[in-house]
């Protein structure tokens, strides 16, 4: 009788242990499957306060359109590198980083391209960033940058995005000039348009004043701006903004100002 009772007790204990095992095992398996699944796509745009070329929704929708569905796609089937390459092909995306967390969140970090100028060409408008990378204008956001127009010596195909393949030196010189302007608050606020004539001579159209600033070729940038500073500091306050129609910075050690048909050398 005692032996039979012990057998029953051992049986009950074994049954209890097995039940606990299956319940715990099922829970672990369920949690493991949850961790294997992509539950959410979280997009972070680092410079969204300054630049608004792309939105979080746009990036998330692009990923979904390429086969990643939250609640259905498994993390082990997601190729982070391929997603990054897909996002980096977007014209305004400079760099993307894709990773996922242990709780099934696909995390996407986006850095946008920062335009420093706008090119107005025969094939449409383009932005150029701080690396001389060009990309088409994007609807919905217009950054406050100088507009370059006229006889621009760059052949940019319609809707092109990438680095300039012809006259690369000129493109880089223009980039350096605009970076110099943007780094100085006074020049950034002053220069609204840059015009290029058929000889490659650059002229600035200031936001205030009815005169034209002839800058010349893109050489001696700092020296020419020192002369322009001298004009605004020492000359303009004494004569007023309507005295001259052209301010020429091309010549060494002088500023040539044109008043109607008369040249005045200062």
Image (cartoon, rainbow, N blue to C red):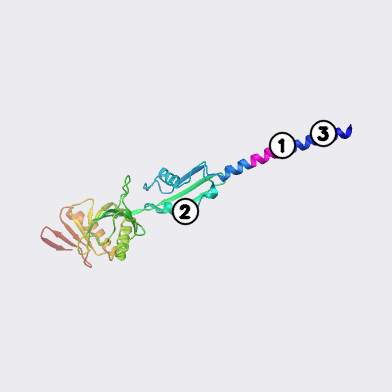
Residue that mark 3 sits on: 8
Q: In terms of secondary structure, where does tag 2 sit?
A: helix
Does 241 appear above or below 71?
below
> Considering depth in this image, is 128 or 232 the residue closer to the camera?
128
Instruction: Work out which residue is located at the far right of the displayed protein and give it.
Output: 1
Find residue 130 and name its label.
Answer: none
Q: Is residue 92 left or right of residue 109?
A: left
Find residue 19 and name its label.
Answer: 1
Residue that mark 2 sits on: 82
Residue span colored magenta = 19-28
Residue 5 at x, y percent in the picture:
85, 32
Q: Quadrant of the N terminus?
A: top right
Point 31% across, 66% down: residue: 169
Q: Assess whether residue 160 is covered by the magenta stretch.
A: no
Q: In terms of secondary structure, where does tag 3 sit?
A: helix
**Magenta residues: mostly which secondary structure?**
helix
């Amino acid at each position: 009788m005692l032996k039979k009772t012990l057998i029953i007790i051992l049986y009950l204990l074994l049954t209890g242990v097995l039940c606990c095992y299956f319940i715990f095992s099922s829970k672990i398996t369920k949690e493991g499957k949850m961790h294997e699944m992509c539950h959410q796509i979280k997009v972070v745009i680092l410079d969204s306060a300054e630049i608004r070329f792309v939105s979080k929704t746009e990036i998330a929708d692009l990923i979904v359109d390429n086969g990643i569905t939250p609640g259905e796609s498994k993390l082990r089937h997601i190729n982070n590198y391929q997603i990054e390459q897909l996002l980096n092909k977007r014209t305004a995306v400079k760099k993307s980083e894709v990773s996922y967390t242990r709780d099934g969140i696909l995390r996407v970090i986006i850095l946008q391209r920062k335009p420093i100028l706008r090119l107005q060409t025969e094939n449409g408008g383009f932005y150029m960033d701080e690396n001389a990378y060009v990309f088409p204008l994007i609807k919905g956001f217009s950054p406050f940058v100088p507009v370059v127009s006229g006889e621009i010596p760059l052949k940019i195909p319609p809707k092109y995005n990438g680095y300039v393949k012809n006259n690369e030196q000129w493109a880089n010189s223009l980039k350096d000039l605009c970076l110099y302007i943007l780094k100085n608050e006074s020049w950034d606020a002053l220069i609204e348009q840059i015009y290029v004539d058929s000889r490659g001579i650059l002229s600035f159209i200031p936001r205030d004043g009815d005169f034209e600033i002839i800058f010349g070729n893109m050489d001696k940038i700092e020296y020419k701006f020192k002369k322009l500073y001298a004009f605004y500091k020492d000359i303009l306050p004494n004569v007023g903004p309507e005295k001259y129609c052209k301010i020429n910075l091309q010549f060494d050690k002088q500023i040539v100002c044109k008043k109607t048909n008369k040249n005045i050398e200062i």
